[in-house]
Image (spheres, coloured by chain):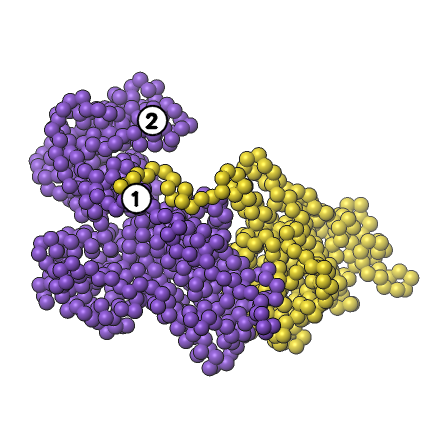
Amino acid sequence: MSETVPPRSGPPNGSSWPVRQGLDLVPTTADKQSAKDFKTDQEVRWCPGCGDYAVLAAVQGFFPELGLRRENVVFVSGIGCSSRFPYYMNTYGMHSIHGRAPAIATGIAASRPDLSVWVITGDGDGLSIGGNHLIHALRRNVNLKILLFNNRIYGLTKGQYSPTSELGKITKSTPVGSLDHPFNPVSLALGAEATFVARTLDSDRKHLTAVLRAAAEHRGTAFVEIYQNCNIFNDGAFEVLKDPDTRDQALLRLEPGSPMIFGTSTVKGSRTTSGAGASPTTSRGVRRGTDGGVEVCAADDPAVLTHDPALLDPSTAFAVSRLAQPTPVGIFRAVSRPTYDDLMQHQVDLATSTGSPADLGELLRAGDTWQIS
Amino acid sequence: MTPLVHKPVEQRDGVVIRFAGDSGDGMQLTGDQFTSQTAAFGNDLSTLPDFPAEIRAPAGTLPGVSAFQVHFSDHEILTPGDAPDVLVAMNPAALKANLADLRRGGDLIVNTDEFTPRALARVGYERSPLDDDSLESWRVHAVSLTSMTLEALKDSGLSRKEAERAKNMFALGLLSWLYHRPTAGTVAFLGRKFARQPEIAKANVAAFEAGWSFGETTESFSVSYQVKPATMPAGTYRQISGNLALAYGLIAASQRAALPLFLGAYPITPASDVLHELSKHKRFGVRAFQAEDEIAAIGAALGASFGGSLAVTTTSGPGVALKSETVGLAVSLELPLVICDIQRGGPSTGLPTKTEQADLLQAMYGRNGEAPVPIVAPRSPADCFDAALEACRIALTYRTPVFLLSDGYLANGAEPWRIPDVASLPDLRVPFATVPSDGSGYLPYARDPDNLARPWARPGTPGLEHRIGGLEKADRTGAISYDPDNHDTMVRLRQAKVDGIARSIPAMVVEDPSGEARVLVLGWGSTYGPIGAACRQVRDAGGAVAQAHLRHLNPFPTNTGDVLGAYDRVLLPEMNLGQLASLLRARYLVDVIPYNRVRGMPFKSGELVGVITDVIDSV
Ligand SMILES: Cc1ncc(C[n+]2csc(CCOP(=O)(O)OP(=O)(O)O)c2C)c(N)n1
Ligand code: SF4
Ligand SMILES: [Mg+2]
């Protein structure tokens, strides 16, 4: 589903940019793996009922499908409840410092093309203290998979509002309501020109797994926002998106090639979910609005948008990301652009493959020298 | 060029020249080029570039003055010289800013064309100092540099503005004649520099030659001077600045360790040149990553270290402040990482282009928790090469972050360097962890009993999958542990590991030719030159003084306490308010006598002679 955005200037020496796909260069194994292979002996210490468990199970559950050698997988996290994640994955891992995981992971990916590098971060970790590193990783298109666990709260520090908390949020640090306008992580990532941007939910294992699989196979930075319930400090934050009675009206499931239709319809007395083929009479659709954004319209409106995550221009994806009711989930954007680490490797390969081998003595003696005997 | 007119030639054993002009006058290039000629001639030399932080401060103003001092001699020298013997002043501002430093009786070459009423007024001269007797203590050579350059280039086809720019080459030509410098290198250099603009190259060469010829024919200079080549140990030499030596040292370390070099850096004066240099050497597999900030720079380096690279981050004091938390993480992860701090005047933005040694305590203590980090400091520009190798050796052997503390003076200063034989450089190869052969599980925090280093397991190694992090780890297993006794053990182990590095470093060497000294002058970092020169002068005058210099500031060499205790007085000059002095007093209970100046400039050896003499007299 991806097209290639060429870099603005060509590579040196008239060679071509490296074109790599998905998990190229990461060694695979023929051994059959199971979720158990990715579990560690560490006791998982999230609160009972925390959404993080579901994400961990989904990741451990789908990793065997990738068939990667465990030793060539690295999970790097910052600090937060969610950032404990690497301890529970039986791969290489680093639980680093608050907000810095994208930077650390950039160093790993840029120096080791044979590794599949995953970043686990939270809404505070990734968007507050580490916001700068996040947007720069996205714009560079480093070969990283960034999973942002958005619970709209600071969990580990016991419940202060976060950069994704809604305005007016009452928390310990905002007893009469928070004052700052929240980030929409998907809009932010699209603004940073991320090549892969998706949103999914902790509770929808199937959707979550599908999104993670696509992320894993994307070459470049894949940014996945995961709505995650913190049942201790922000319970039910995404309940309308999960409750069977409300979710169909509240969620817009983005499917490539399908019209953007949501809602339920009662056909012959039974309720069916939204999506392609839903009855146009009771569902609704999304079309471009007059103000440049998108708006909800009748499901049979001829202007209903067809979802195309491969569009090079991110503006439609951005407009869709601005929707709150319904809340879009799925892959907003998936385009291909040379990755930072592939390009860096390319420059090194080019330099090392031309001319005579690098000689330290020659380097030290280069330029004007003189002899003293 | 062969002399046309025969003027008398006098011998000098050493000369200090300072070129001073506007930031846009090309003084750094002029100085560099004079230095290259001097190096090629075989003199010993030492340089001191001194330029404003602003790229182009307003023309003709005092803050806009840029200067380059070079000291060259027929014997070994240690400093760029206290006071110039020759000052080239390209405009009134340069004269005003530098005249006080010029040795009485020294040569003052002024570009009279720039001494217009407006330019004079700009820097507060009511009338031209060339017209009164205010310059009578010096030998003034009034030279109309600009107009003679224009005259020489009148047929070049260049505009007046372009032609005027070549006046620095006229000055260089004149000085080259005056000190019998070889000229071929400069002509070749100009050809290279302006390869794409042959007419500019030609004009610069013409101006350079015109300057030379002017020296030969003018009556303003009645003699020229010769400074014989210095006797130095046999070998192949080149001229090198501290930052270049540092970059080469890092490449050499990666070659000797057989590990790819990864640099994470964010531009900052005076460290950026290391980033620039390393970015050129992809042929050696160097990956230079310009990060979004200093935190990302060290973060990426730490990530690369986890991946098995020789990882380095280069910065200056403000950048170190940002990196502190990650340095602490590296202490906890026990991964190799070299943090190069090219110190500059602080606090805060401070004096970006000036030198200082005030980051020692930041490197030593600037982290939360008990987070010991070894510290290495080079003592001269060329020594940055060896210091880089040593910092990498410690980092790789002990799996620890290491600070390398250079400074602005070392970074930009240059000296001749005897190029080492690559085979003589230390072997820095260290083993990566392998799967335990006895079938037991991998223990990321099991330690080498000798040096307490933990194993370094590279991702991609099957069977060694492990997780590490900034949370306290259980001894041996590395699993998260909140156990009080374990924490106490781990804190002490990390400290013991760093303390144990002392066993791998050479003892402190004391230089005391007479063996009679009762006063020791101790230093660290870039004060080596001025302290050494001062000690020589004291000894030449019949005094007895001992000198020792610390390369390792954490841990100290094992004999440090004994050495300090063996003298009646220990004098410690530092370009800070006594940071090493505090460490030594606390550690060895020796009441060292601090001598502190924080002027953004290196010490003058003459000033230290006075201080040393006073201390000797007080014994
Ligand atoms: C430098 C630094 N500042 C503050 C903290 C304290 N801290 C730890 S986690 C956290 C917020 C985590 O929130 P989020 O990223 O949303 O993760 P969650 O716990 O919600 O999963 C804060 C402020 C820290 N560990 N380090
Ligand atoms: S505090 Fe919230 S986010 Fe953290 S573990 Fe508990 S439920 Fe999960
Ligand atoms: Mg959170």
- Residue A78 visible? The answer is no
Q: Chain of mark 2?
A: B
Q: CA distance from mark 2 to mark 1?
A: 42 Å
Q: For mark 2, give the secondary structure.
A: helix
Residue at left offset 11%, top offset 32%? B131
User: In this figure, which residue is indicated by the disc labeled 1?
Assistant: B235
The image quadrant where one finds the N terminus of chain B is: top left
Q: Amino acid at mark 1?
A: Gly
Q: Nearest the camera: A356 or B62?
A: A356
Q: Chain of mark 1?
A: B
- B98 shown above or below B450: above
Q: Where does the image place residue B86, in percent across and percent down from the top left? A: 17, 38
- Residue B464 visible? The answer is yes
- The label number, if any, that marks residue B312 in the structure image: none
Q: Amino acid at mark 2?
A: Glu
Left of A170 or right of it: where is B231?
Answer: left
Q: Where does the image place residue B98, in percent across and percent down from the top left? A: 19, 42
Q: Where does the image place residue B90, in percent across and percent down from the top left? A: 23, 34
Q: Colour of chain B?
A: purple
Choose the circle earlier in sequence order: 2 or 1: 2
Dot 2 alpha-carbon crowd within 10 angstroms: few under 14, some 14 to 19, many 20 or more: some
Dot 1 alpha-carbon crowd within 10 angstroms: few under 14, some 14 to 19, many 20 or more: some
User: In this figure, which residue is indicated by the disc labeled 2?
Assistant: B162
Left of A2 or right of it: where is B131?
Answer: left
Q: Pointer 2 and pointer 1: residues touching (CB < 8 Å)?
A: no
Residue at left offset 66%, top offset 42%? A4
Q: Is mark 2 within 8 Å of ligand 1?
A: no
